Image (cartoon, helix red, strand yellow):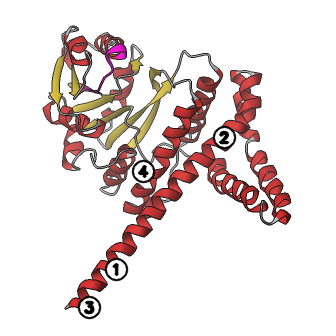
Amino acid sequence: MYCSVIIPARNVAKTIGECVIAALSQSVPRDLYEVIVVDDGSTDATGAVARSHGVRVIPQPPLGMAAARNTGARAARGEILLFLDPDCVPALDWIAQMIAPFQDSTVVGVKGAYVTHQTGLLARLIQEEYEDRYRCLESDSLIDFVDGYTAAYRRSAFLSAGGFDPSLGAAEDVDLSYRLSKKGHRFVFTPKAKVYHHHGSTLRRYVASKLRYGLWRSLVYARHPDQTGKDGATPPELRKQIPLAGLAVASVVLSSRWQRLLPLAGVFLAAFASTTVPFAWRARRSGTDAALASPALLFVRALALGTGLAIGRTSLVGQGLIERAARLGRAFRH
């Protein structure tokens, strides 16, 4: 099967070279795949660096990662589309591992896995988060969705579904997966298809990413209400942690007025802490410091995700009320 590796890129001149070199150095023969870089309106040397390695570069205005992936898909010649983020470095056998499941003609999407060389505490904890999700997925022969950072689709199915929705600021890969699933298409997880990633090293960036993801995920759930709470990659503990973290913070805030609520905050925090024990136990393989720090990070994660989801749902409710009021206004005028 001829494949197309599509790398959406904007202002990533520092990382795109290593990404492209790794994509060009796969165990699969070079005459069986192409590499396409879609330059999404970069203002640095991203396009020039990619061209220097002899790959095809398609420039476009800054329309976002989803639009860039769609541009690459439309220009691709491969039967299989492989999407790779520009800050990732695929392992030598990444393509081989990603395309192997497509020998089954019923498989339409394949998901790979993140790994990292970083040794910092936050990066190790973030990697443990991914490992926790992968643990949930490995027990399933089929999965709910394919993450865009290392993903593969049959080109025909991808294009017939309309590709990624550029109007979504995040979670566009989840939305696409749900749309494909409703058509009866199958996805599989291939943990051996590894890409090395720099997870970041600042808590501020981590919180911002979780908040943003929660906000856009709420919109995806509004589009696909039948999928709410059915994400197979979400550890069951997280489903409990989000409301518990919110209730704990709410109790602390309200206790400034009603002091009797303060012990209730302690109850919620104790309940939350109990849900972190399995993760902390598994995180010890990354070091004792990771195990000890994990409850705090999980609390921050739950609070950020929950806040993002709440903001998204509130704005959707508000938008619905505005639209209903507008309809009533038109009805009264007529």
Of residues 68 and 63, the one nearer the viewer is 63
| Quadrant assignment for the C terminus | bottom left
Q: Amino acid at mark 1?
A: Ala
Picture quadrant where residue 35 is located? top left
User: Could you tell which of marks 1 and 2 lies nearer the N-terminus?
Assistant: 2
Specify start and end residues of the magenta stretch as a single range.
5-15
Q: How much space separates mark 3 and mark 2, taking CA atoms?
A: 50 Å
Q: How much space separates mark 4 and mark 1, taking CA atoms?
A: 25 Å
Q: Position of residue 292 (x, y in %)?
A: 77, 30
Q: Position of residue 55 (x, y in %)?
A: 19, 15
- Residue under label 2: 298
Please tell me whether mark 2 sits on a helix, a strand or a loop.
helix
Picture quadrant where residue 297 is located? top right
Label 2 crowd bin: few (<14), some (14–19), many (20+), radius 10 Å: many
Q: Residue at x 78, y 50 (%)?
A: 269
Please tell me whether mark 1 sits on a helix, a strand or a loop.
helix
Q: Nearer the viewer, mark 4 or mark 1?
A: 1
Please tell me whether mark 4 sits on a helix, a strand or a loop.
helix
Callout 1 touching callout 2 (CB < 8 Å): no
Picture quadrant where residue 41 is located? top left
Q: Position of residue 272 (x, y in %)?
A: 74, 49
Callout 4 touching callout 1 (CB < 8 Å): no
- Residue under label 1: 325
- Residue under label 3: 332
Q: How much space separates mark 1 and mark 2, taking CA atoms?
A: 40 Å
Q: Residue at x 31, y 30 (%)?
A: 83
Q: Is 104 situated left or right of 188 in this image?
A: left
Label 1 crowd bin: few (<14), some (14–19), many (20+), radius 10 Å: few
Q: Let me know if residue 141 appears in the view.
A: yes
Q: Position of residue 136 (x, y in %)?
A: 58, 41
